Image: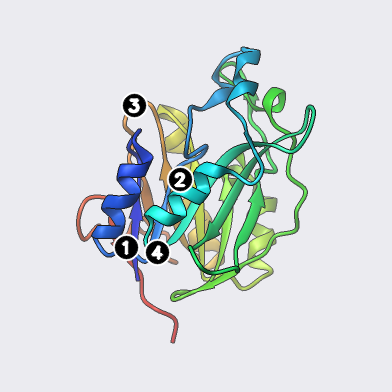
Amino acid sequence: MRVAFITEVDWLAGVQDAAAAGADLICLPLLSFGPYVADSLDRGGYEKAERAPSPCYARALEAAEGAWLAASSYESEGEGVFYVTGRLGRAGNGERLLWRQRYLDQWPGRYEPMFSTPGHLPAETIELKCGPVGMLLGGDLRSHEAWLSLSDLSVRAVGCATADPGDLWDKTSSVAASMALLHGFTVLVANRGPDGSASVAFDPRGEPLDQVTPGIVELEEAA
């Protein structure tokens, strides 16, 4: 099962390139279709929200040409109600995993509680070639409770999306490796760090998976 990570600003071109490379699953970083709105106390960030369900996600699904797509959108569901919403699905298939970021970062440079409501959906999975797959977003990756909620569902792999620069990315990737080892998951992390931080994947031993080509890894299919 071939997994591609997209980190380009031009997400549509990235999805098209990944589909052409034969990806079975395409993973985009946090807030896949726009800027990271919570980096400053600017109320103009609210204007970047899409009405749910995200039209950009629908466009990306079509561009994926039948591949599964894991992406997250900044969505508004009514006056003053905003979520960071992750979806994992594919075009022509009504089955879709939905997850809303539950744990929000709050410190200088990351003002997520100003822009988003914490998600409250129960953890769930979707069946891919590698087995049951779950999803985590942003600060969820640094919450042991979030990982435990997936461990209870016998997850084989977790698709993660974040937007972490520098030292925060080092912490996130270290936690992801530890959780892969602790719970026996394969962990796939798509990052959009402004310093060019690379996305990464860990096997169930917590070891980085080799990339067959830049931005692409391959997972074993479920027996």
Residue assigned mark 2: 174
Residue at 60% of width from left, 20% of height from top?
45
| Residue 223, x across and y down, in percent | 44, 87
How far apart are the two marked residues, 3 and 2, measured between alpha carbons? Answer: 18 Å
Residue type at the position of mark 3: Asp
Residue type at the position of mark 1: Ala
**Marks 3 and 4: which is nearer the front?**
4
Q: Secondary structure at mark 1?
A: loop
Q: Is residue 137 above or below residue 148?
A: above
Q: Earlier in the sequence, mark 3 or mark 1?
A: 1
**Marks 1 and 2: which is nearer the front?**
1
For the rendered model, the colour scheme is: rainbow
Contact check, label 4 and label 1, Cβ < 8 Å: yes
Q: Earlier in the sequence, mark 4 or mark 2?
A: 4
Q: Is residue 15 left or right of residue 176?
A: left
**Marks 4 and 1: which is nearer the front?**
4
Q: Nearer the viewer, residue 147 or 130?
A: 130
How far apart are the two marked residues, 4 and 1, measured between alpha carbons? Answer: 6 Å
Residue at 44% of width from left, 35% of height from top?
169
How far apart are the two marked residues, 1 and 2, measured between alpha carbons? Answer: 26 Å
Residue assigned mark 1: 23
Q: Residues within 10 Å of mark 4 (few under 14, many from 20)?
A: many
Residue assigned mark 3: 195
